[in-house]
Image (tube, grey):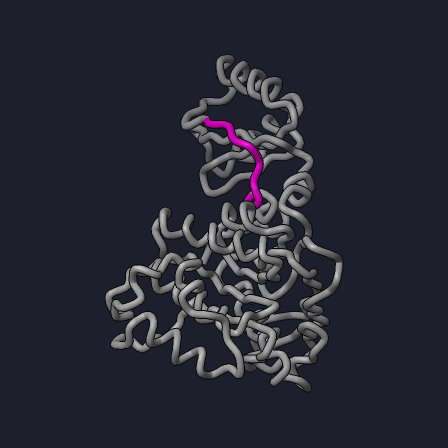
Amino acid sequence: MESSQIVIDADGLIKNYGSFQAVRGVNFQVFQGEVFGLLGPNGAGKTTTMEMIEGLRKPDGGRAIVAGFDTQKDLGKVKEVIGVQLQSTSLFELLTVEEIMRMYASFYPTSVPIKPLLEDMTLIDKRNGRVKHLSGGQKQRLAIGLALLNDPKVIFLDEPTTGLDPQARRTLWEIILKLKERGKTIVLSTHYMEEAHVLCDRICLMDQGKVVALDTPRNLVKSLHSDSAIEFRLNGIDEENMEQVLGELREIREVKSVDVRKDIFVLYTDKLQDSLIDLIERSAGGKLELFDLQTRTATLEDVFISMTGRSLREE
């Protein structure tokens, strides 16, 4: 991050749709030059929150300040300093890439040169190709390019890699990191924990319209108080003996906590070797019948589940 200058101040944002409260008093600040992630499952309120900050949706409570401008009182000024890539962007399919860039550039009093921008988006070889012939990843890069034409201070990217193949996703990650290097402030929504971990300086975990945690990826994972996870399934488990089995698992050496996700048991530990040896010894003694055993490092997904009891991937 370049400095601790506040670029976005979301203060108590609320949005209702009839009796349904989509966003319930969201508060956070975004600093100059950081990539700020909104991470949560579908329906967590990420897009609605972003749209209120962008001025596309009027809050029912609270306010949003962007680069010193109130989105409800100074919307014209806000539009001058932001660039927005929506979750789904409708593009004129029959125009060429360069034609649509020139058309969007004409909407602004000043705009950046188009050729270098196409090079940055790795679309220079597609400049004369029609939009309808672009792949999904190319269309997403074009949408980001269009959002950058006015040289915005703040860029909003709403789930930019959803539906893309791994290669296209990585290409977009590189573009986002280059924008950060140039001092841009980026607000990114995603439900991919790896994406948030790789790209974001800080992550705001959202669930059911609320902020459940906000910190750096590293600190969020450290909040679990466990470096490692042991995952496995067990034979012969039913409702009657579940509590007894959980009690047995909690007694395993150095285990900090135990989770059950459908039929998968997860043990969290700081001392993987000690816990693993004890678990296997108990299995060898006939108390537990293990299968599909694996170990891994703790992740943002684990943090989210420990705080909400739900998975990031749940619809």
The magenta span reads 294-301
Q: Position of residue 56 (x, y in %)?
A: 55, 80
Q: Position of residue 132 (x, y in %)?
A: 25, 69
Image: 311 above or below 291: below
Q: Residue at x 54, y 14 (%)?
A: 281
| Residue 91 colored in magenta in the image | no
Is 56 left or right of 315, judged from the image as shown? right
Is 229 left or right of 87, judged from the image as shown? right
Q: Position of residue 187 (x, y in %)?
A: 58, 62
Q: Position of residue 100 (x, y in %)?
A: 35, 76
Is 299 left or right of 119, judged from the image as shown? right
Image: 198 above or below 293: below
Is 237 left or right of 13, judged from the image as shown? left
| Residue 296 colored in magenta in the image | yes
Report the number of discs: 0
Q: Residue at x 44, y 66 (%)?
A: 145
Q: If the image is split into quadrants, where does the C terminus sit?
A: bottom left
Image: 258 above or below 72: above
